[in-house]
Image (cartoon, rainbow, N blue to C red):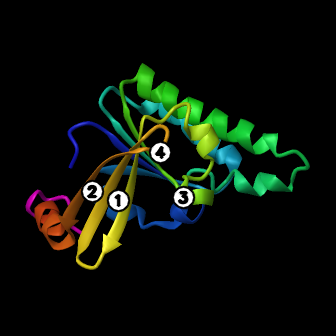
Amino acid sequence: MWRSGAFYVGLGKHAFYDSGRLSRLGLKFYGVLSFREELETLLELGILVNERDLIVYDGFGSLIFPLYAYPRGHVIYSAGTLVVSLLSKLSIDKRTTVIIVSGEGAEGRPLLFSVLRAYVRRYFWFVREGKLVRIIVKDAELSQVGTLRLDAGEVLEEAQSRGITKGL
Protein backbone atom coordinates (compact mmCIF):
# COMPACT_ATOMS: atom_id res chain seq x y z
CA MET A 1 0.00 0.00 0.00
CA TRP A 2 1.15 3.52 -0.73
CA ARG A 3 1.28 6.18 1.95
CA SER A 4 0.24 8.81 -0.54
CA GLY A 5 -2.63 8.53 -2.99
CA ALA A 6 -2.29 6.25 -5.98
CA PHE A 7 -4.38 6.48 -9.12
CA TYR A 8 -4.71 4.01 -11.99
CA VAL A 9 -6.12 5.35 -15.26
CA GLY A 10 -6.95 2.49 -17.63
CA LEU A 11 -7.57 3.56 -21.22
CA GLY A 12 -9.31 1.47 -23.86
CA LYS A 13 -9.13 -2.25 -23.02
CA HIS A 14 -7.42 -1.40 -19.73
CA ALA A 15 -10.67 0.25 -18.58
CA PHE A 16 -12.07 -3.24 -17.99
CA TYR A 17 -9.59 -4.31 -15.31
CA ASP A 18 -11.04 -5.54 -12.06
CA SER A 19 -11.36 -2.31 -10.08
CA GLY A 20 -11.83 -4.30 -6.86
CA ARG A 21 -8.39 -5.86 -7.21
CA LEU A 22 -6.82 -2.48 -7.87
CA SER A 23 -8.59 -0.86 -4.92
CA ARG A 24 -7.26 -3.61 -2.62
CA LEU A 25 -3.81 -2.49 -3.73
CA GLY A 26 -4.67 1.05 -2.68
CA LEU A 27 -5.23 2.39 -6.20
CA LYS A 28 -8.14 4.64 -7.12
CA PHE A 29 -9.34 3.25 -10.46
CA TYR A 30 -10.52 5.23 -13.49
CA GLY A 31 -11.75 3.29 -16.53
CA VAL A 32 -11.74 5.54 -19.59
CA LEU A 33 -13.32 4.63 -22.94
CA SER A 34 -13.32 7.85 -24.96
CA PHE A 35 -11.01 10.78 -25.62
CA ARG A 36 -13.53 13.11 -23.99
CA GLU A 37 -13.52 10.98 -20.82
CA GLU A 38 -9.73 10.98 -20.95
CA LEU A 39 -9.62 14.79 -20.85
CA GLU A 40 -12.27 14.92 -18.10
CA THR A 41 -10.26 12.43 -16.03
CA LEU A 42 -7.06 14.45 -16.44
CA LEU A 43 -8.84 17.60 -15.30
CA GLU A 44 -10.33 15.74 -12.32
CA LEU A 45 -6.91 14.39 -11.38
CA GLY A 46 -5.67 17.98 -11.38
CA ILE A 47 -8.03 18.58 -8.45
CA LEU A 48 -7.61 15.25 -6.60
CA VAL A 49 -3.87 14.65 -6.82
CA ASN A 50 -1.65 15.75 -3.96
CA GLU A 51 2.10 15.99 -3.54
CA ARG A 52 3.93 12.64 -3.73
CA ASP A 53 0.97 10.80 -5.24
CA LEU A 54 1.39 8.21 -7.97
CA ILE A 55 -0.46 8.12 -11.30
CA VAL A 56 -0.25 5.03 -13.51
CA TYR A 57 -1.53 5.98 -16.97
CA ASP A 58 -2.04 2.69 -18.81
CA GLY A 59 -2.80 2.52 -22.52
CA PHE A 60 -1.43 5.87 -23.66
CA GLY A 61 -2.43 6.56 -27.25
CA SER A 62 -5.16 3.91 -27.44
CA LEU A 63 -7.97 6.47 -27.50
CA ILE A 64 -6.11 8.80 -29.83
CA PHE A 65 -5.43 6.35 -32.67
CA PRO A 66 -9.07 6.25 -33.82
CA LEU A 67 -8.49 9.89 -34.79
CA TYR A 68 -6.51 8.54 -37.77
CA ALA A 69 -9.91 8.56 -39.50
CA TYR A 70 -9.52 12.32 -39.81
CA PRO A 71 -7.85 13.47 -43.02
CA ARG A 72 -4.96 15.20 -41.28
CA GLY A 73 -2.51 13.28 -39.14
CA HIS A 74 -1.56 16.30 -37.05
CA VAL A 75 -4.81 15.86 -35.10
CA ILE A 76 -3.30 12.78 -33.46
CA TYR A 77 -0.11 14.54 -32.45
CA SER A 78 -2.04 17.54 -31.15
CA ALA A 79 -4.27 15.29 -29.04
CA GLY A 80 -1.28 13.29 -27.78
CA THR A 81 0.62 16.45 -26.93
CA LEU A 82 -2.37 17.78 -24.98
CA VAL A 83 -2.59 14.58 -22.91
CA VAL A 84 1.14 14.36 -22.21
CA SER A 85 1.43 18.06 -21.38
CA LEU A 86 -1.44 17.75 -18.87
CA LEU A 87 0.29 14.76 -17.25
CA SER A 88 3.57 16.70 -17.21
CA LYS A 89 1.87 19.67 -15.59
CA LEU A 90 0.47 17.39 -12.87
CA SER A 91 3.92 15.93 -12.32
CA ILE A 92 5.59 19.33 -12.01
CA ASP A 93 2.92 21.35 -10.20
CA LYS A 94 1.88 18.64 -7.75
CA ARG A 95 5.28 16.89 -7.47
CA THR A 96 3.57 13.70 -8.52
CA THR A 97 5.12 10.60 -10.04
CA VAL A 98 3.53 9.74 -13.39
CA ILE A 99 4.11 6.38 -15.06
CA ILE A 100 2.90 6.26 -18.66
CA VAL A 101 2.39 2.73 -19.97
CA SER A 102 2.42 2.52 -23.75
CA GLY A 103 2.59 -0.16 -26.38
CA GLU A 104 5.49 -0.56 -28.74
CA GLY A 105 5.19 1.23 -32.05
CA ALA A 106 7.35 1.32 -35.15
CA GLU A 107 11.08 0.65 -34.96
CA GLY A 108 10.91 -0.46 -31.32
CA ARG A 109 9.84 2.97 -30.13
CA PRO A 110 6.90 3.67 -27.80
CA LEU A 111 3.62 4.67 -29.44
CA LEU A 112 3.58 8.39 -30.21
CA PHE A 113 7.30 8.66 -29.42
CA SER A 114 7.53 12.01 -31.18
CA VAL A 115 5.01 13.37 -28.67
CA LEU A 116 6.56 11.70 -25.62
CA ARG A 117 10.19 12.60 -26.31
CA ALA A 118 9.77 16.25 -25.22
CA TYR A 119 8.36 15.24 -21.82
CA VAL A 120 9.81 11.85 -20.85
CA ARG A 121 13.26 11.48 -19.28
CA ARG A 122 13.49 7.69 -18.99
CA TYR A 123 11.94 4.70 -20.73
CA PHE A 124 11.76 1.19 -19.28
CA TRP A 125 11.34 -1.99 -21.32
CA PHE A 126 10.33 -5.19 -19.54
CA VAL A 127 11.27 -8.38 -21.37
CA ARG A 128 10.42 -11.84 -20.05
CA GLU A 129 13.23 -14.35 -20.60
CA GLY A 130 12.09 -17.67 -19.18
CA LYS A 131 12.11 -17.26 -15.40
CA LEU A 132 13.92 -13.94 -15.61
CA VAL A 133 12.62 -10.43 -16.25
CA ARG A 134 15.08 -8.14 -18.03
CA ILE A 135 14.55 -4.42 -17.44
CA ILE A 136 16.16 -2.16 -20.02
CA VAL A 137 16.52 1.52 -19.12
CA LYS A 138 16.82 4.05 -21.94
CA ASP A 139 17.20 7.82 -21.94
CA ALA A 140 15.00 10.36 -23.74
CA GLU A 141 16.72 9.62 -27.07
CA LEU A 142 16.30 5.84 -26.59
CA SER A 143 19.98 5.21 -25.93
CA GLN A 144 20.41 2.35 -23.49
CA VAL A 145 21.47 3.52 -20.03
CA GLY A 146 21.40 0.22 -18.17
CA THR A 147 20.03 -3.30 -17.88
CA LEU A 148 18.88 -5.30 -14.90
CA ARG A 149 17.88 -8.98 -14.76
CA LEU A 150 15.59 -10.16 -11.99
CA ASP A 151 14.17 -13.56 -11.15
CA ALA A 152 10.39 -13.26 -11.62
CA GLY A 153 9.77 -15.61 -8.67
CA GLU A 154 11.92 -13.49 -6.36
CA VAL A 155 10.07 -10.33 -7.41
CA LEU A 156 6.72 -12.00 -6.66
CA GLU A 157 7.96 -13.27 -3.27
CA GLU A 158 9.21 -9.78 -2.35
CA ALA A 159 5.87 -8.25 -3.37
CA GLN A 160 4.04 -10.82 -1.24
CA SER A 161 6.30 -10.22 1.76
CA ARG A 162 5.55 -6.50 1.54
CA GLY A 163 1.81 -7.15 1.30
CA ILE A 164 1.56 -5.69 -2.19
CA THR A 165 -0.27 -8.71 -3.59
CA LYS A 166 -2.49 -9.27 -0.55
CA GLY A 167 -6.09 -9.86 -1.56
CA LEU A 168 -5.36 -10.77 -5.17
> Which amino acid lies under the numbered mark 2 shown in the image of this protein?
Leu
Point out which mark residue 25 bears. 2
Cα–Cα span, label 4 and label 1: 31 Å
Tell me whether circle 1 and circle 3 mark residues in contact (CB < 8 Å).
no
Q: Which residue is the site of mark 4?
A: 142
Q: Determine the secondary structure under disc 4.
A: loop
Question: Quick one: label 3, few (<14), some, or many (20+) residues within 10 Å?
Answer: few
Secondary structure state at the residue bearing disc 2: loop
Contact between marks 4 and 3 (CB within 8 A): the answer is yes
Marks 4, 1: nearer the viewer: 4
Q: Is residue 90 above or below residue 116?
A: above
Q: CA distance from mark 1 to mark 2?
A: 5 Å
Task: Report the amino acid beneath label 1.
Answer: Leu
Q: Which residue is mark 3?
A: 108
* Along the viewing direction, whichever of 42 and 145 lies nearer the viewer: 145
Q: Position of residue 40 (x, y in %)?
A: 62, 39
Magenta span includes 167: yes
Point out the tag, 4 or 1, that comes first from the N-terminus: 1
